[in-house]
Structure formats: C-alpha cells, structure tokens
Image (cartoon, helix red, strand yellow):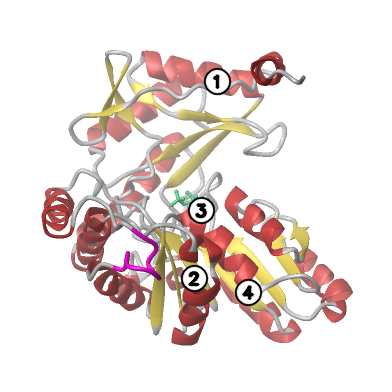
Amino acid sequence: MIDLDETAREALETLREKGLLRRIRQTEALEGMLVRREGRALVNFSSNDYLGLARHPALIAAAGEAAMAHGAGAGASRLVTGDHPLYARLERRIAEVKGTEDAVVFGSGYLANVGTIPVLVGRGDLILADKFAHACILDGAQLSGADMLRFRHNDMAHLEEHLAAHRGRHRRCLIVTDGVFSMDGDLAPLPDILALARQYDAWVMTDDAHALGVVGQGENWGRGSGFAFDPVARADVQMGTLSKAVGAYGGYVAGSATLCDWLRNRARSLVYSTGLPPGVVAAASAALDIVTLDAGRVARPLMLARRLAGRLGLAEPASAILPLIVGDAEAAVAMARRLEDEGFLVAAIRPPTVPQGTARLRITLSAAHEEGQVDALADALTAMGLAR
Ligand SMILES: *Cc1c(COP(=O)(O)O)cnc(C)c1O
C-alpha cells in the first residue's frame, strides 16, 4: 500500500528543503491598489489588474444585473445550453477591439491556450515556442502531441535556424509567443516573427495576457501587442485573457470567422467545460467599453511604469511590468519581505518560473496607483540599493 498522505508529506518536504515550498496567503482587496494581508494594509505592486477595473463600479453593476437577469451560473457547456445571450455581445466587442472577424470566449486564458493549440496542430506538426513563453502555452503544446522546439528568447536568428532545419519534415507549423512577456515585460518582435512565418509557411499565435488594455500606439492604444507596431502586426491567432487588464475572468481567441468556428467545434476545454457565469461575461463586456472609451486610463499603467523606471535609472519599459533582477532566489525573497515591512506588496519570482540565477522582484503598475505610491516605492527601492 502506498500511503497518500505519506507521499504528499515527502513531496512537500522535498520542496521545503529546496526553498520552493509555496503558501497561498489570504489577500483582501481594499480601496484602490491597497490590500490587507495578515491585518496590514499594503500597496499592491503585484496585481495584474492593470486598469484598476476589478473593483470598478460599472463592472460590479454589470455583474450584479446579469446575475439577477440570467442567474449565478451558466448551467452547462456553451454547446449545450450554457450560451446565455451575453456571450454574443462579449465576443463581438473582443473582435472589434482586436480588429478581427470574430472571437471565441473560453473559461480562462489557461483554458484558451490548452484548448486552442491542440486544435491547430497535432502529431506530425511542429510548434516553435519562445523560451520564455507562458506555462499554459507549453501545456497546450504538450497536449497537442506535436513536436515542440524552443527558440532563445526573442532570438530571431535562432527561430530561423529551427525553421530551416525542421520545418520541411513537418506538415503544419505554429510559432507561438507571449506578446508581452509576463516576467520580463518586453514585447515579442512580431513583425520579424510574421515575416519568418510567411517565408517558412507557418502560423503565428500570440498570447496577449499582459498586452490587452496596456500596450498599443496612438489611436490603437490598449488593443494589444500587435498594435504597438506600425504597421500593425497581425498574428493569425490572437489569444488573451479577460482576467488581467479587463478585470473580470475568462479567456479568448480572436481571429478569422472560420478559425473561431473551428475552435467552437473542436477545442476540448470549450466543449467539455461549463460556460462562464453571466455576471463574469457582463463585467468583461463593460470593461471593454471602458478600454475603448477611456484613453487616459489605458495610457496610465505604462506612464507609471516609465515614471518608476526613470526614478530608478532603468531603461524605458515597453509594458506595465518592470522586473528588477536580483539573481539569487533567497536574496529576492528577503527584499520582498523588507518591502512588505515598509508597506509594499512586491512579489519575488523564483525558478522554475524564471531561469536559474535570474530571481527577481516583479513590479506591475496599474492605472489605479497614485503617483505618490509609485514615488514612495521608488524611494524604498533606492534605499535598498536597487536603483542604478
Ligand atoms: C495569466 C496568463 C495566462 C492565463 O490566463 P488566465 O485567464 O489567468 O487563466 C496565460 N498566458 C499568460 C502569458 C499569462 O500571463
């Protein structure tokens, strides 16, 4: 007999010995970007609520009204009876924001990736993924059964090397990358990736979890990573989440009408999972209205990230994510603890989430931060010797 609890205890002990044991800490949302942890108020610099919409009155009202009208849960998969009327509006709004024919909403960003990639490619096909691509892209790739190769982060020469050496022996080929990288905050060079894809007959999929609502250019601010380029770089498959800047929950894929119909038919995480609660879908729609109309709010996270980087003497960031590389995992954790003592919540990110020797403080800026809060963090980081 293999004892379950004994097995679990040993596994946890191994994690503890490696300093990798994780603990979920209760965090209560207060006003603005303030949260309460263990009785203390902290300014949250680790949230992905980039536009401060998670607690916006318009989203809360939309969620409440939708729950009253349509119920608390969807009751079934969207393909059975779970496709309440709010879905069509949300998918239309996403397609408008992304400039695509259509969009499909999934239960989460994670479910969008693990559902979509196995529809696009399978055994005998090739996936080329950036070395820093998000974990759920890799999970989706694994589920697909396609051969996967990683290329060095944003290294176009390495991507081309893989294409030249391996493309010919595979049927379909999918290049997949984060649009904005979750732990580094930099942009993928989408125009170059698209050019290589055309040359080697490959499809391009972007994960815009940290791009929607935050990056873009001019009129197209907030529409996502492809819109940060001129001309706009249009990936074939534009995936994203409704749980970060959009402040609600759910994931999406935007693209051609045919692609979306294919996914509605074949993506197992959509077909075999219950639809999102009506309140969540309504909140996401309300948020997209704000993303389209409130240009000041959409410009603010990047503006604040640049303000903080400027105060610290760092290079100008391309997104609302500012990584401060510490190197040693324990040192990063100690710094996060010290910041917490001073009233700032800043997550220390350790391997395996980031490569060995690149443990870091990952700071995210939100439209809901006040300038004074950002400047106070800059002062604390400078006092800790983290400014250049
Ligand atoms: C958060 C994240 C996801 C997952 O989205 P959820 O809606 O939270 O499931 C996918 N990709 C990237 C790059 C992310 O950062």
Residue 380 lies, in percent from the top left, at 39, 22
* Residue that label 2 marks: 238
Residues at marks 1 and 4 touching, judged by CB atoms closer than 8 Å: no
**Residue at the image point whose x is 25% and y is 67% from the top:** 84
**Residue at the image point whose x is 16% and y is 57% from the top:** 66
| Disc with the residue nearer the chain's start (1 vs 3) | 3
Residue type, numbered disc 2? Gln
| Disc with the residue nearer the chain's start (3 vs 4) | 3
**Residue at the image point whose x is 48% and y is 66% from the top:** 271
Residues at marks 3 and 4 touching, judged by CB atoms closer than 8 Å: no
Residues at marks 4 and 2 touching, judged by CB atoms closer than 8 Å: no
Q: Which mark is residue 105?
A: none
Residue type, numbered disc 1? Val
Quarter assignment of residue 242? bottom left
Residue 387 lies, in percent from the top left, at 49, 30
* Residue that label 4 marks: 120
The label nearer to you, 4 versus 2, is 4
| Disc with the residue nearer the chain's start (4 vs 2) | 4
Residues at marks 2 and 3 touching, judged by CB atoms closer than 8 Å: no
SS state under label 1: helix
Residues rendered magenta in the picture: 76-83
Q: Give the position of the N terminus as an image quadrant.
A: top right
| Disc with the residue nearer the chain's start (1 vs 2) | 2
Q: Residues within 10 Å of mark 4 (few under 14, many from 20)?
A: many
Q: Residues within 10 Å of mark 1 (few under 14, many from 20)?
A: many
* Residue that label 1 marks: 333
Report if residue 156 is visible in the image: no
* Residue that label 3 marks: 110
Is 208 in the magenta? no
Q: CA distance from mark 3 to mark 4?
A: 16 Å
| Disc with the residue nearer the chain's start (1 vs 4) | 4
Q: Is residue 219 above or below residue 188?
A: below
